[in-house]
Image (tube, rainbow, N blue to C red):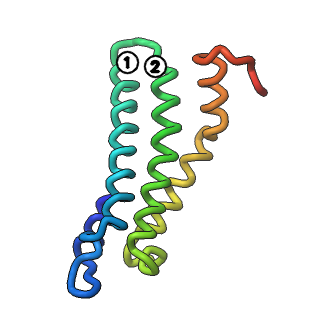
């Protein structure tokens, strides 16, 4: 997000920063809000862990949301950068690759969803 916002402020087209357009602003704002929500559930999981409470739901929700929202945000950062988003110079493609990996490892998001469905929604085990 930081790299995308910085680029949106610095990159000028037709005499104004691309970040002055809602087509750039709105997706960045949406992804920023999603990341803030993921951060909050992460803090809640950490607080429960620190207090010795069961934090399985919060930890799994944090992993799921963070991996998905961070990948989306990194993808939007690439889009904000346009063609520059795929160059090593701007780093955002490398960030996207690293964020995408978090949907698969160390535990896949599908397994996280299985945990939530079974342990918190009371659905039968699916595997």
Q: Residue at x 59, y 24 (%)?
A: 116
Q: How busy is the neighbourhood of tag 2: few (under 14 within 10 Å), some, or many (20 plus)?
A: some
Can you say whether 27 is above or below 32 in the image? Answer: below
Residue that badge 2 annotates = 55
User: Which quadrant holds residue 25?
Assistant: bottom left
Q: Quadrant of residue 80?
A: bottom left
What SS does tag 1 mark? helix
**Residue 48, labelled with which disc?**
1
> Would you say 17 lies left or right of 51 here?
left
Instruction: Give the image location of residue 114, x and y in percent.
Output: 66, 28
Q: Is residue 49 left or right of residue 75?
A: left
Circle 2 SS class: loop
Residue 19: x percent and y percent? 27, 70
Figure check: 98 above or below 86:
above
First in sequence, mark 2 or 1: give its number: 1
Residue that sits furthest to the front in the current view? 22
- Identified at 28% across, 84% down, the residue is 13
Image position of 61 (left or right of 51) = right
User: Can you name the residue that lies furthest to the right here?
Assistant: 127
Instruction: From the top left corner, tell me how far across and down residue 92 is, in percent.
Output: 42, 67
Q: Quadrant of the N terminus?
A: bottom left
Q: Residues within 10 Å of mark 1 (few under 14, many from 20)?
A: some
The residue positioned 27% from the left and 79% from the top of the image is 11
Q: Nearer the viewer, residue 6 or 87?
A: 6
Q: Nearer the viewer, residue 30 or 63?
A: 30
Say if 69 sits above or below 89 in the image: above
Q: Dividing the image into 4 quarters, which one contains the C terminus?
A: top right
Picture disc at residue 63? none
Q: Are marks 2 and 1 in contact (CB under 8 Å)?
A: yes
> Toward the viewer: 48 or 15?
15
Distance from Cα at disc 2 to Cα at disc 1: 6 Å
Residue 10 position, x and y percent, is 23, 76
């Amino acid at each position: 997000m930081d790299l995308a916002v910085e680029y949106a402020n610095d990159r000028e087209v037709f005499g104004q920063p691309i970040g002055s357009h809602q087509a750039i602003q709105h997706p960045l704002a949406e992804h920023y809000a999603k990341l803030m929500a993921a951060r909050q559930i992460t803090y809640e999981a950490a607080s429960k862990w620190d207090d010795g409470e069961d934090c399985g739901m919060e930890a799994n929700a944090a992993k799921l949301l963070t991996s998905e929202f961070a990948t989306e945000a990194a993808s939007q950062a690439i889009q904000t950068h346009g063609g520059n988003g795929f160059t090593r110079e701007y780093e955002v493609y490398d960030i996207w690759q690293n964020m995408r990996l978090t949907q698969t490892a160390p535990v896949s998001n599908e397994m996280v969803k299985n945990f939530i469905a079974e342990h918190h929604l009371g659905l039968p085990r699916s595997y």
